Amino acid sequence: MSTLDAIVIGGSAGALDVLLNLLPQLPRGFSVPIVLVLHVMPRKPSYLVDVLKARAALGVEEAQDKQPLQPGTLYCAPPDYHVLIERGRSLSLSVDDAVHFSRPSIDVLFESAAVALRSRVAGVLLTGGNEDGARGLEAISRAGGITVVQAPKSAQMPHMPEAALARFTPTRVLSSAELGPYLTSLGAPE
Amino acid sequence: MTQPSSEDVELQVLLDAIYQRYHYDFREYAEASLRRRVAAALVHFDCETISGLQARVLHEPKVFTELLDFLTVQVSDMFRDPSYFRAIREQVVPWLRTFPTLKVWVAGCSTGEEAWSLAILLAEEGLLDRTLIYATDINPESLRAAEAGIYPLERMALFSKSYLKAGGKKSLSSWYTTSAHSAMLDRSLRKSILFSDHSLATDSVFAEVELISCRNVLIYFDRELQDRAIALMRDSLRRRGYLGLGSRETLRFTSHDAAFEEAAPKERIYRKR
Ligand SMILES: C[S@@+](CC[C@H](N)C(=O)[O-])C[C@H]1O[C@@H](n2cnc3c(N)ncnc32)[C@H](O)[C@@H]1O
C-alpha cells in the first residue's frame, strides 16, 4: 500500500511539456490522487484538461470545490482559483489574492497539503520562471513529506527549481526522464 | 489521528473567542484558506502567535473590525463570468417575467458588484420596477461600499467588456456617471436594492424569493456549513425558484443535491424541484 494520500505537482513555463511526457507513464491503477497547479494556463479552462486527458491513463478532471480525492485521478486547478487540500482529504477552492502574481498558486496548494497531510504527501516542483512553489515545497519537507525537484539542467526554465534548492535539500532531484519511473513507484498499488 | 498541533488548538480557540464575543461564526469555515488568512493577519497585526492575536481581538473591538477584512475575502467584479449573467438573462428572466412582483437575493454581495450587475440586467429587461433585490453580507465595510456603488474608474473598462459579453443592451457607461477617478452607478437602480447584514452561518430565512445568486461564498465554508447555507437558501426559494453559484461551485458534494435540478449546468444555475 502506498503511504501517500496525495501527490501535488506544480510548474510554470515549460511544465506542460514535462507533463505530456510524464502522464502516459503513470498506469491506470495508480493508487494516489494527484493535484496539479500549472501557471500559464491555456485560456479555455477545459482545454488543459482535454490536452492532459488525451495523454493520460488516469482520469483527468478540473478540481471542484469540496470534491473528495480519489485514487487514480488527476485534478487540475481551474483558472483564476487557488486550490487547497483540506484535512478531510478533499479539495477547496478560493479566490483569495494572488501569490507570486499567480492564482492558482503552487505555494497555496503545497502549504495546504503540508498542513493537511503532513508526511503523507509528495510534492513535485517542475520547471518555471518564478519562485512560486519553493516555500510550499519546503513546508512539505518540514512536515516530513517527500519532495522532488526537477533538475535545473533538465528544466526549460531553471528558476523555479533553483529557488527551491536554495532553500532546502529535497528527497530527490530528478531529470524529466527520471520523473516517470519515480512517480510510478510512489503510486504503485500494494 | 495525530495529535492536534498547538497552532490547531490556538486557531479553534480564536474562532470560539470571536464567536462568543462578537457573534461572527467562522468555526465551520474551510480551514485551509482560513489558516492562510489568519497567518496574513498575524503579520499585519505584528503578533507572533494566534493566542497573541486572540488577546488583542478580545480587548480591542477595533482590531476585530480590521481582522474581519482578513477573515473574509472581498473579491468581486461586475458581470464576473459573463456567460453566467447571459444565462440568467436568457433562461431565468422569462420565468421571472411571469410574476407581478419579484424578490432576488444576492447572498454574500461583498462590495456590491454582483447586485448592481443584476439590477442593470433586470432594468434592461424591464423588470426592475417590480423587483426588490436583497444584497447581504457579513462585512459592514463592504456593505457600506456596496451601498455607495462607486468604483474606481480604471475598473470600468473590464466591467464594460464583461457587460457586453453578458448580453448588455446598451453601453455600461449609460448606467454610471464619472468624476475624476471614479464611476458612480445610476441612482435610479439604487432604490430597488436593499443592502443589509445577514450571515449564512448564523441567521435564518427572511423572505421568499424567486432567484438567489450566491457566488464564491460557499467555497469558504466546510461541507457542514455549506449544507446549512444551502438549506437556508432552499427554504428561502419559491417552488421552482433559481439558485446561481460560482463557476466552480457545485451542489454535487452537498446533502441537498436532490432538492435541486440543474437548469444551466455549465453556469452552475440550479432550480428548486
Ligand atoms: C469572494 S466574495 C464574493 C462576492 C460576490 N458574490 C462575487 O461573486 O463577486 C465572498 C463574500 O462572502 C462574504 N461572506 C463570508 N461569510 C459569509 C457569511 N457567513 N454570510 C454571508 N456572507 C458571507 C464575504 O464577506 C465576502 O464578501
Image (cartoon, rainbow, N blue to C red):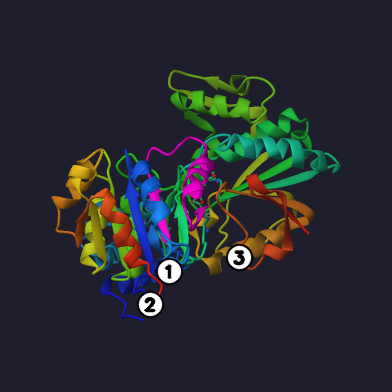
> Label 3: which residue?
B254
- Please rate how many residues cluster around mark 1, counting C-alpha atoms within 10 Å: few if below 14, some from 14 to 19, many from 20: many
- The answer to which quarter of the image holds residue B100 is top right
**Along the polypeptide, which appears first: circle 2 or circle 1?**
2
- Answer whether labels 2 and 1 touch (C-beta < 8 Å): yes
What residue appears at the point 46 percent right and 45 percent down from the top-left corner? B141
Q: Which residues are magenta?
A: A34-63
Give the side of residue A124 with respect to residue B204, left or right.
left
Q: Chain letter for mark 1, please.
A: A
Q: Is residue B191 visible?
A: no
Residue B162, image x, y percentages:
57, 29
- Please rate how many residues cluster around mark 2, counting C-alpha atoms within 10 Å: few if below 14, some from 14 to 19, many from 20: few
* Front one among A131 and A60: A60
- Amino acid type, residue under disc 3 in the picture: Thr
- What's the distance in space between the residues labelled 3 and 2, CA to CA? 30 Å
Same chain for mark 2 and mark 1? The answer is yes
- Amino acid type, residue under disc 2 in the picture: Met
Residue A104, image x, y percentages:
40, 46
Q: Chain letter for mark 3, please.
A: B
- Amino acid type, residue under disc 1 in the picture: Ser
- What's the distance in space between the residues labelled 2 and 1, CA to CA? 8 Å
What residue appears at the point 29 percent right and 42 percent down from the top-left corner? A100
On residue A31, the disc is 1
- What's the distance in space between the residues labelled 3 and 1, CA to CA? 25 Å
What secondary structure is marked by label 2? loop
- Please rate how many residues cluster around mark 3, counting C-alpha atoms within 10 Å: few if below 14, some from 14 to 19, many from 20: some
